[in-house]
Amino acid sequence: MSVDARIARGGVLVLWAIFFGVLWETGASARYLGSRTQWIVPFGTVVLALAALVYAYGYLRARRGGPALTLREASGLFALLVPLAAVLLVPHAALGSFAASRKGNGLHFLSAGQSAPSKPSDASFLDIRMAEGDTAFAAQAGIKPGLRVHLLGFVSGSSDVPRGTVEIARFYIACCVADAQPVGVPVDAGRTFAKDTWLDVTGSLERRGRRFVVKGERIVAAKEPSQPYLSFRT
């Protein structure tokens, strides 16, 4: 029994259009794409949906059967669906301490030249890390010892922190989740926490050697946010 190749091609278009449409409707695109590339979701939804409609119209207008689906073309269409299968198998993809230990220390983002926060108290993980090695940025952002900050992140388990502290981190993405890099800040919490525990931390910055450390004043366990990734500002 042969399969009309046109039906298979149209089916792939429809599945991708539905996928982008669901991401757009639910707002889940932030789990997979950075702020610079999220435009792909509405664009893909509209373009693929229109393409699928045009393709269906052409199919219905045709008065004869189309070519049979070959093994070679079927393999190519299957390859186009592999990314969808990967997302469906890991619907709530989130990176934690295990991935952080293997994906570097965010040096790519530290050199990206992010703009300063609108006010010092809004300093993020990346702002604090950049201020450690860039005195000009630190002065512009108002990041200095005594600054009160608020951070929400997961315990990364990194040992590259001042003694008596634990590191909480967030993953930053530029294009998509594939290029995610962890950026962490040490916290003097007065106790230890299990890896991957999400903590809501409020405290003041202290300088300990080459690192800024948050002296925890209020530390509470928190739920993973609906959008676990952050993007650097431009």
Image (spheres, grey):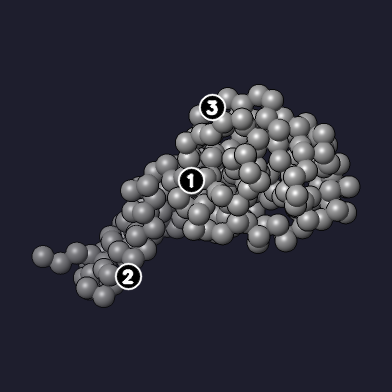
Residue 134 image offset from top left, x and y in percent: 82, 55
Crowd around label 1: few <14 · some 14–19 · many ≥20 (10 Å): many
Amino acid type at mark 2: Gly
List the residue tagged with mark 1: 96
Front in this rendered view, residue 137 or 232: 137
| Corner quadrant of residue 22 | top left
The answer, for residue 54, to whether it is visible in the render is: yes
Q: In the rendered structure, are the residues bearing label 2 and label 3 in contact, judged by CB atoms less than 8 Å apart?
A: no
| Corner quadrant of residue 144 | top right
Which element type, helix, strand or loop, lies under badge 3?
A: strand
Which element type, helix, strand or loop, lies under badge 2?
A: helix
Residue 152 image offset from top left, x and y in percent: 61, 34
Q: In the rendered structure, are the residues bearing label 3 and label 1 in contact, judged by CB atoms less than 8 Å apart?
A: no
Q: Residue at x 28, y 60 (%)?
A: 7
Q: Residue at x 50, y 29 (%)?
A: 223
Q: Alpha carbon of mark 3 to alpha carbon of mark 1: how far? A: 16 Å
Label number found at residue 76: 2
Q: Earlier in the sequence, mark 1 or mark 2?
A: 2
Does 123 sit above or below residue 69? above
Q: Residue at x 19, y 64 (%)?
A: 3
Q: Alpha carbon of mark 2 to alpha carbon of mark 3: how far? A: 47 Å
Amino acid type at mark 3: Ala
Q: Earlier in the sequence, mark 2 or mark 3?
A: 2
Task: Indicate the quadrant containing the N terminus: top left, top right, bottom left or bottom right.
Answer: bottom left
Does 146 sit above or below residue 160? above
Which element type, helix, strand or loop, lies under badge 1?
A: loop
List the residue tagged with mark 3: 221
Q: Residue furthest front?
A: 163
Q: Earlier in the sequence, mark 3 or mark 1?
A: 1
